[in-house]
Structures are given as C-alpha cells and as structure tokens.
Image (tube, rainbow, N blue to C red):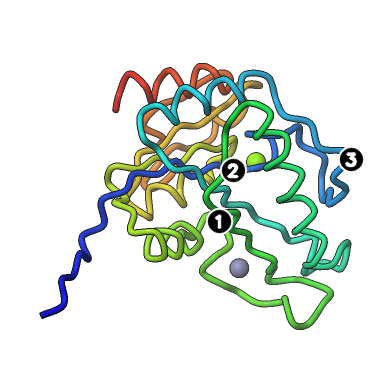
C-alpha cells in the first residue's frame, strides 16, 4: 500500500508586503521603487532559524483598477526575492489577490475570497505546502491583515508604527495577538512565543 503523509506539519509566517516588508508606495509595480523596511532582512533571517517558511500574501487591486497588468507582479516578486536573498532569506511563495469589487478591468472585478481580510490566500498556500495554520503567523500593518490571519486560524502580529491602526475597534477577528512598533519587534515577539 502506498504510504501517505497528509498531516500538515510545516509552520509558516504569512507576510503582508506593502508597509510591512517594503516601504508603502500605493499601487506600485515598479521594481526600482521597492525598498525593504528597516529590520526586515535581519528579522526574517532570525525567524528562519526556527524553521518557519515565508509567504507573501498581498492585495494587488491595482490590477483590477487597471493601473498595471497582472504580469507586472512577476517583476515585483523577483525584486523582493532579490532584496531578501542578499540576506540569505527566501520566500517559499508569493500570493496575491488581483481583484477588487469595484474594478475597471472586468476580468478582475469581483468579490473574492482571496482579498484580505478574507483568508483565501493563506488557505491556498496551506493546502499547497502542507502548513499547519495553528502553528503559523500572519504579520501585517493593518487590521485587514490581522483579520485574514485570524480567519485562517493563525496567530497574528500587527505592526503599527504610527499607532493609528490600534485605535480602531479591535473586535472579533480584528484583534491581533500582539502589536509591534516595527518589524524587529514583531520578529522578537514571534521568537519569544514560538
Ligand atoms: Mg500593508
Ligand atoms: Zn481575490
């Protein structure tokens, strides 16, 4: 009989991109404008020693709104991998939602389950890579990231450098397990609570 191992046993950290890993430039798909935020490379390197696999999960409504083509996101992913590889960090996957309910490009204009705060991107990665969501984390800079992480059954860290997001109602799925002021602090919180 064929031996099967279907128990998800990998642990992941799901990472928002804009405002979490790189400086937030609204609707940017130009690789030359991408800049890693302070503490990201070091933080991820530390976390990788704990056996975490990294996935980007990002809303890219610029596709639905017609600001850039879906194909442009390959260049964004490549640039991000390149920026991180200088520090010895690799992303196992780059998941994006190109949709928006009020888009300009018909093919991408819809309500979907992959646009955060819905957890579709995390669930898709989990199935594909055999990830145990309860042992995994979502890190992001807005409450929609927190909600997506909680809906997927992950632990969550909100990076709230400007201290605005934490003043909104933190109810239901929008309650982060931890709040950090920057990426280094978020990484330390995960290190301490793994
Ligand atoms: Mg963000
Ligand atoms: Zn979507």
Mark 2 vs 1, N-terminal side: 2
Mark 3 vs mark 2, CA separation in Å? 19 Å
The residue positioned 61% from the left and 25% from the top of the image is 40
Frontmost of labels 2 and 1 is: 2
Asked if 97 appears above or below 38 in the picture, the reply is below
In this view, the residue in front, 80 or 88, is 88
Frontmost of labels 3 and 2 is: 3
State the SS at label 1: loop
Frontmost of labels 1 and 3 is: 3
**Circle 2 residue:** 16
The residue positioned 50% from the left and 21% from the top of the image is 180
Task: State whether label 2 is within 8 Å of ligand 1.
Answer: yes
Mark 1 vs 3, N-terminal side: 3
Locate residue 3 relative to residue 186 in the image: left or right.
left
Of the 4 image quadrants, the one containing the C terminus is: top left
Asked if 9 appears above or below 175 in the picture, the reply is below
Q: Which mark is residue 116?
A: 1
Mark 1 vs mark 3, CA separation in Å? 26 Å
Q: Position of residue 181 (x, y in %)?
A: 56, 18
């Amino acid at each position: 009989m064929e031996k099967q191992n279907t128990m998800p046993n990998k642990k992941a950290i799901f990472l928002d991109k804009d405002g979490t890993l790189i400086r937030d430039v609204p609707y940017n798909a130009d690789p030359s404008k991408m800049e890693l935020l302070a503490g990201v490379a070091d933080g991820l390197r530390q976390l990788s020693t704990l056996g975490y696999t990294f996935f980007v999960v990002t809303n890219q409504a610029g596709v639905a709104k017609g600001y850039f083509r879906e194909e442009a996101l390959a260049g964004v992913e490549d640039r991000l991998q390149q920026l991180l590889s200088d520090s010895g960090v690799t992303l196992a996957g780059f998941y994006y939602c190109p949709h928006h309910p009020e888009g300009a490009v018909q093919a991408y204009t819809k309500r979907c389950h992959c646009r955060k705060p819905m957890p579709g991107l995390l669930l898709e990665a989990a199935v594909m890579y055999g990830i145990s969501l309860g042992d995994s984390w979502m890190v992001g800079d807005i409450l929609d990231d927190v909600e997506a992480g909680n809906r997927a059954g992950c632990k969550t860290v909100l990076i709230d450098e400007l201290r605005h997001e934490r003043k909104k109602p933190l109810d239901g799925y929008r309650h982060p397990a931890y709040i950090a002021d920057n990426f280094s602090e978020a990484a330390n919180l995960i290190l301490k609570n793994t």
